[in-house]
Image (spheres, rainbow, N blue to C red):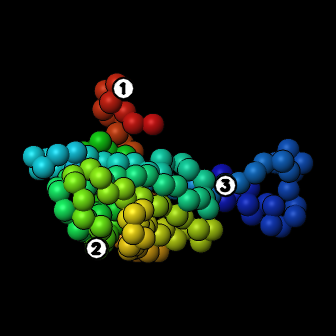
Amino acid sequence: ANGAAILAAHLSKSFDTSIQNIRLLDVIPRSLGTDLYQSKKDKNGYYNIVAKRNTSFPFELKSECTTLYANQDEMEFVVYEGDEEEVTKNKKLGNFTLMNILPGRQGIPKIEINFRVDENAILTVSAVDKRNGSSESLQIVSDKGRLTDAEIIQMSREIQSYPEEIVID
């Protein structure tokens, strides 16, 4: 609400000089990431946060992962928004599959995951096999499939109720 009031004052050009040097930034309200598996035995992946909450946008951030199996030629990426350590407690935004990964021993392929949020808050997530250039991507418009204000408030309350040592910043 304060940000909206300051922006309105700036746009109307009738603002107090005390706010003249305030810089407003658009930020993502929750962390963004994917689920990743560390071993074949994992039933649930862990949350690989690529962009932390309150990161100002536009931005482009990268992470790297690899395959779990020898000669694995595809990987599914599920994109989440949220700040819970357990990946399934976060909001699923979408998923895509990277195909045609150059086969190799387990852990040899290097897959780059790229999260980009543009000035219109459009999220594009892509994955590229760095050895052969095979790529796939997913685009998510800010209001489609994203957390609502009510969901953000509820998740914030839940996180604040946890003991301090497991709160994620």
Distance from Cα at disc 3 to Cα at disc 2: 37 Å
Q: Secondary structure at mark 3?
A: loop
Residue type of the residue flagged with mark 2: Met
Q: Earlier in the sequence, mark 1 or mark 3?
A: 3
Q: In the image, 127: left or right of 40?
A: right
Q: Which mark is residue 113?
A: none
Q: CA distance from mark 1 to mark 3?
A: 28 Å
In the picture shown, does residue 148 fall above or below 105?
below
Disc 2 packing (10 Å; few <14; some 14–19; many ≥20): some
Q: Residues within 10 Å of mark 3 (few under 14, many from 20)?
A: few
In-front residue for pair 102/165: 102
Among the two numbered marks 2 and 1 on one chain, the one whose residue lies closer to the N terminus: 2
In the image, 30 versus 66, the foreground residue is: 66
Mark in front: 3 vs 2: 2
Q: Is residue 94 left or right of residue 116?
A: left
Disc ID at residue 99: 2
Give, as a three-letter code, the residue at label 1.
Answer: Glu
Label 1: which secondary element: helix
Where does label 1 land, which residue? 164
What residue is at 71 percent from the left and 54 percent from the top?
24
State whether residue 21 is above or below residue 78: above
Q: Are marks 3 and 2 in contact (CB under 8 Å)?
A: no
- Image quarter (top left, top right, bottom left or bottom right) of the C terminus: top left
Q: Amino acid at mark 3?
A: Leu
Give percent across and percent down for residue 147.
39, 62
